[in-house]
Amino acid sequence: MWNTKKSGFLLLLLFLVVLVIGINAGEVAAVWEKAVNICLSCVGIG
Amino acid sequence: MMWALRRWVQSAATVLSNAYALFPFTRNIYQGKLKSVCVPGLNCYSCPAATGACPLGSLQTIFANIRPSFKAGNFHIGLYVLGMLGITGSLVGRMPCAWVCPFGFLQELIHKIPSRKIEIPHWMIYIKYGFLALFVILLPLIVVDGLGYGTTWFCKYVCPTGTLEAGIPMLILQPQLRELAGLLYLNKIAILIVFLVLMVFIRRPFCRTVCPLGAIYSFFNKVSVFRMVHHPDTCVLCKECYKGCPMGVRFYEGANQPDCIRCLKCMQESCKFDAISYEFAGLPVKEEKAESAKSP
Ligand code: SF4
Ligand code: SF4
C-alpha cells in the first residue's frame, strides 16, 4: 500500500532530481535571461 | 499569536520579494543573479522592485520557447522551475499561498474593508485548473508563430499581479512605453480592477478561482510532508473553522483539501474543540493554542 507518511519525502527526492536535471540542462540561465528583461506581456503592451 | 506571526512573515516576504530599492534611479528592473531563482509566491519579475523570478512567468516562457530551444539543441522543458515548485509543494503543499505570496497578502488586507461578505459557489474553485491547463501549459505550447515561438498567455491576457506590479509602475518609470498601451493594456487593467473590487466582498477571490500557481501547489496538499489533521471524534460540526477560513474551506469535511493554504487560523483561533492539528512526516505536532481558542 502507498505509504502516505513517506510520500512527501519520496516526492521531495523526485523533485530534487528534477531540479538537478534542469540545472544541468542550462535552464537557470534561461530563467535569468527572461527575468532580467522587461516582459511586455506582463506589462500589458505586447 | 500565530496570526500576528503570519502577518509579519507575509510582510517580510513581500518586502524581500521586492527589495530592489534602486529602481527610482535606474528606472529599470533589477538584473542581478538572484533573478535566476523563482520566488515561491506570485510576484511579477517585471516589477521594478522584484528580486526574483516569477515561477509562472518562467514556466510559460520555457513552454512558449520549447520548439526553438529543441532546434538549438538545448532541450529546456521547465525542469528547473518544476523542481523548485515540486520541492516546496512536497514539503508544505499550498502553504506559500498563506505565508509568502504578496498577492495573497494583498487580498487578505483588502478583504478587511468592512462590507457585506459574499460566498462563491464551490464549483468555482475548479476554474483555476482550467487556467493552469490552458493559459500556462497548452496555449503557450501549441499556438506558435512562423518561427516556432509561442507566447505567455496567462501573463499577457490575465495576470492582475503583473498589471499591478509591472504594468502600472513601468509605464510611470518609462514614459516611452505609454505609446504602446492599447486594448491589451485596457483588458489587463479591467481584470485588475474587477479583482480589487471582488477582494472586498469575497475571501481571496483570485487564489480560489484563477491562480494557476495555487492550483499547482494544491496537488501536493494530500501528500506533502507537512499536513493538517482533522479529528472527527472531537469535532462537533460547529463550522467555526469555515467561518474564519481565509479560503472558505470546510475543514470539517476533511483535512488537506485543495484550497487549504495551511494558514493555521482554524487550528489556532477558530476550533474550540481540539479537532484540528497538524503533523510533520506523519508525526503529530503539539502546539499551544491562542488564548481566544482555549475554552469552548
Ligand atoms: S471548528 Fe472544530 S469542532 Fe467546529 S466544525 Fe471545525 S473542526 Fe469541527
Ligand atoms: S482550512 Fe484552516 S489552515 Fe486551511 S486555509 Fe482554512 S483556516 Fe487556514
Image: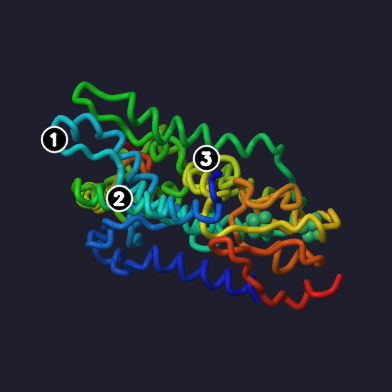
Tell which subunit mark 2 falls on: B
| Gap between marks 2 and 1 measured at Cα | 39 Å
Marks 1 and 3 on same chain: yes
Question: In this rendering, is residue B32 above or below B295?
Answer: above
Disc 2 marks which residue? Answer: B175
* Secondary structure at numbered mark 1: loop
User: Front-most of B49 and B183?
Assistant: B49
State which quarter of the image contains the N terminus of chain B: bottom right
Amino acid carrying label 1: it is: Gly
Could you tell me residue B193's position as x and y percent?
Answer: 55, 45
Distance Cα–Cα, label 2 vs label 3: 23 Å
Please report the residue visible at 54 percent of the width from the left and 38 percent of the height from the top: B128
| Cα–Cα gap, marks 1 and 3 | 38 Å
- Residue sitting at 52 percent across and 40 percent down? B191
Q: Is residue B130 left or right of residue B21?
A: right
Judged from the image, the secondary structure of the residue bearing numbered disc 3 is helix
Say whether disc 2 or disc 3 marks the residue closer to the N-terminus. Answer: 2
Image-quadrant location for residue B148: top left
Q: Residues within 10 Å of mark 3 (few under 14, many from 20)?
A: some
**Count of all numbered marks drawn on residues in the image:** 3
How is this picture coloured?
A: rainbow
Does the beta carbon at disc 1 come under 8 Å from ligand 2? no
Label 2–label 1 contact, CB within 8 A: no
- Residue at the image position 27 percent from the left and 62 percent from the top: B34
Disc on res. B73: 1
Q: Amino acid at mark 2?
A: Pro
Location of mark 3 (residue): B191
For badge 3, the amino acid type reads Ile
On screen, residue B5 above or below A46: below
Whether residue A37 is visible to the viewer of this picture, yes or no, is no
